[in-house]
Amino acid sequence: MKLHGYFRSSAAYRVRIALNLKGLGAEHLPHHLRKGEQCAPSYLAINPQGLVPALEDDAGAVLTQSVAIIEWLDETHPRPPLLPKDPLRRAKVRAFALAIACDTHPVQNLKVLARLRELGLPEDKVQDWAAWVNREGLSACETLVKDETGPFCFGDAPTLADLCLVPQLANARRFGVDVSAYPRLLKAEAAAKALPAFANAAPEKQPDAE
């Protein structure tokens, strides 16, 4: 398999964690987002959205969108499972993950922030926007799991929820968010980061890290 990504992309970070948890190898192909390499015609032929990650399987099929990629990995390599068998629990895990992947991360990512700058927003306001988005999303996620005993977001093993949470907390810290306001999320993060699969997927561990 080939994983197209960027060390700081939280979406690619999620997929790296999933691959590690599944014990799967992949050739990592970096595309420098700040240099616009994701907009090169050769990459747009792989992912017309010009986003990372994209995963090419051994047969050459291309998958895009991190959550779809992770669910495909979970279906084709079911151990360890990243979604509960119980339908209600499964829906709760998905809802938490999508609160991050659909409603939080996309509106503070590089493309959106670049557009805010193009529209003339001062840099301090751009940074304030990104911090606000993170606080809004993480506050909701804290409430979603406040009654879960853990130590992970949903139980005693990592799920798709944790794969989305850990990269988002890293984003929040980059934008100066006081994450101490989310003790339940920090508990899940600590449990996750104790696992090599999460630790080895961290941005600073990637060969393209700046």
Image (cartoon, helix red, strand yellow):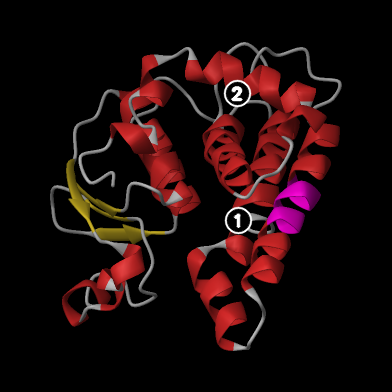
Overall secondary structure of the magenta section: helix
Instruction: Give x and y (percent) for residue 180.
Output: 76, 28
Q: Is residue 52 above or below residue 205?
A: below
Callout 2 amino acid? Glu
Left or right, 130 with respect to 193, comes to right
Q: Quadrant of the N terminus?
A: top left
Instruction: Give x and y (percent) for residue 190.
Output: 59, 17
Left or right, 25 with respect to 112, comes to left
Question: As rendered, which of 74 and 156 lies closer to the eye?
Answer: 156
Tell me which segment is drawn in magenta: 131-137
Question: As rendered, which of 158 and 185 lies closer to the eye?
Answer: 185
Q: Which residue is mark 2?
A: 189
Residue 84: name its quadrant: top right
Q: Which residue is mark 1?
A: 105
- Residue 76 visible, this angle: no
Q: Is residue 133 above or below residue 139?
A: below
Is 140 a magenta residue?
no
Q: Residue at x 23, y 46 (%)?
A: 208
Quote the CA–CA distance across marks 2 and 1.
17 Å
Tally of numbered tags: 2
Left or right, 139 with respect to 16, comes to right
Is 134 a magenta residue?
yes
Residue at the bottom extreme, as displayed:
119
Q: Residue at x 41, y 37 (%)?
A: 75
Tag shown at residue 163: none
Residue 127: name its quadrant: bottom right
Who comes first in sequence, dot 2 or dot 1?
1
Q: Is residue 6 above or below residue 74?
A: below
Helix or strand or loop: what does disc 2 sit on?
helix
Q: Residue at x 49, y 19 (%)?
A: 193
